[in-house]
């Protein structure tokens, strides 16, 4: 039986008029192998709306795996996030240091096979490393919600930060930023999914 993968990314934000996390999620939407089919969606960079869309798609798709993607300028490779924390500095109203879920667990841990993923990516020549802090903005919030949903259903879930793409650093003329080929990032996502199912 073909397993279903819910893959999320984000729309552009701040000075980035192009967000490869959302573009890759949309591009891989409908991608299918004998083992799995990807349902890719692009989330807006708005707290309540992003979470609402995530929850709605979770109910509709009923996935066997949830994987979130986010853009992390300055990253030197594929960042495998391991911990989501129950807080963010600013919500949509500009209020500081709210809990994502009131009196929820202080932290939730990915249940992806992160060491197997890291080794598989490195073996393919794709830089990959762990991160123990997904930030205190929307990436962390979506990661936290992914883990709540996946733990409740008893499936695997996690979050991956990706670096800028070559296309981005060229268009932005910021050559001091590390970057990765977009096709290589797509391949990394497929490897992560294969190892997680």
Image (cartoon, helix red, strand yellow):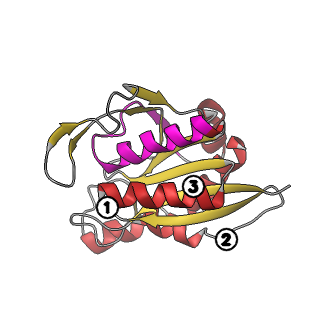
Left or right: 128 as drawn, with respect to 95: right
SS at mark 2?
A: loop
The stretch drawn in magenta includes residue 151:
yes
Residue 163: tell me if it is visible: no
Residue at left offset 69%, top offset 48%: 64
Quarter of the rendering occupied by the C terminus = top right
Give the percent coordinates (x, y) of residue 15: 21, 66
Q: CA distance from mark 1 to mark 2?
A: 23 Å
Within 10 Å of disc 1 (Cα), the crowding (few <14, some 14-19, many 20+) is some
The stretch drawn in magenta includes residue 149:
yes
Picture quadrant where residue 71 is located: bottom left
| Highlighted range, magenta | 127-152
Q: Is residue 57 above or below residue 136?
A: below
Total marks placed: 3
Picture quadrant where residue 85 is located: top left
Check disc 1 and report the residue beneath it. 45
Within 10 Å of disc 2 (Cα), the crowding (few <14, some 14-19, many 20+) is some
Disc 1 versus disc 3: nearer the observer: 3
Residue 15: tell me if it is visible: yes
SS at mark 1?
A: loop
Q: Is residue 20 above or below residue 177?
A: below
Q: CA distance from mark 1 to mark 3?
A: 18 Å
Left or right: 44 as drawn, with respect to 189: left
Residue at left offset 64%, top offset 40%: 153
Q: Which mark is first along the chain, 2 or 3?
A: 2
Give the percent coordinates (x, y) of residue 59: 59, 56
Check disc 2 and report the residue beneath it. 30
Check disc 3 and report the residue beneath it. 58
SS at mark 3?
A: helix
Quarter of the rendering occupied by the N terminus = bottom right
């Amino acid at each position: 039986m073909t397993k279903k993968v819910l893959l999320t990314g984000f729309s552009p934000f701040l000075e980035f008029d192009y967000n490869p996390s959302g573009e890759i999620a949309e591009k891989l939407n409908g991608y299918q192998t004998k083992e799995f089919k990807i349902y890719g969606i692009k989330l807006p960079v708005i707290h309540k709306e992003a979470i609402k869309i995530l929850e709605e798609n979770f109910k509709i798709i009923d996935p066997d795996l949830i994987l979130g993607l986010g853009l992390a300028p300055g990253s030197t490779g594929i960042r495998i996030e391991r911990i989501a924390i129950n807080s963010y500095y600013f919500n949509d109203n500009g209020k500081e240091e709210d809990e994502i879920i009131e009196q929820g667990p202080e932290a939730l841990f990915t249940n992806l096979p992160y060491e197997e993923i890291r080794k598989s990516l490195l073996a393919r020549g794709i830089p990959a490393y762990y991160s123990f802090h997904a930030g205190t903005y929307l990436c962390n919030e979506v990661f936290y919600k992914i883990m709540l949903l996946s733990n409740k259903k008893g499936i695997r879930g996690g979050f991956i930060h990706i670096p800028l793409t070559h296309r981005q650093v060229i268009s932005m003329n910021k050559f001091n930023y590390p970057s990765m080929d977009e096709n290589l990032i797509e391949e990394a996502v497929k490897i992560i999914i294969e190892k997680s199912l």
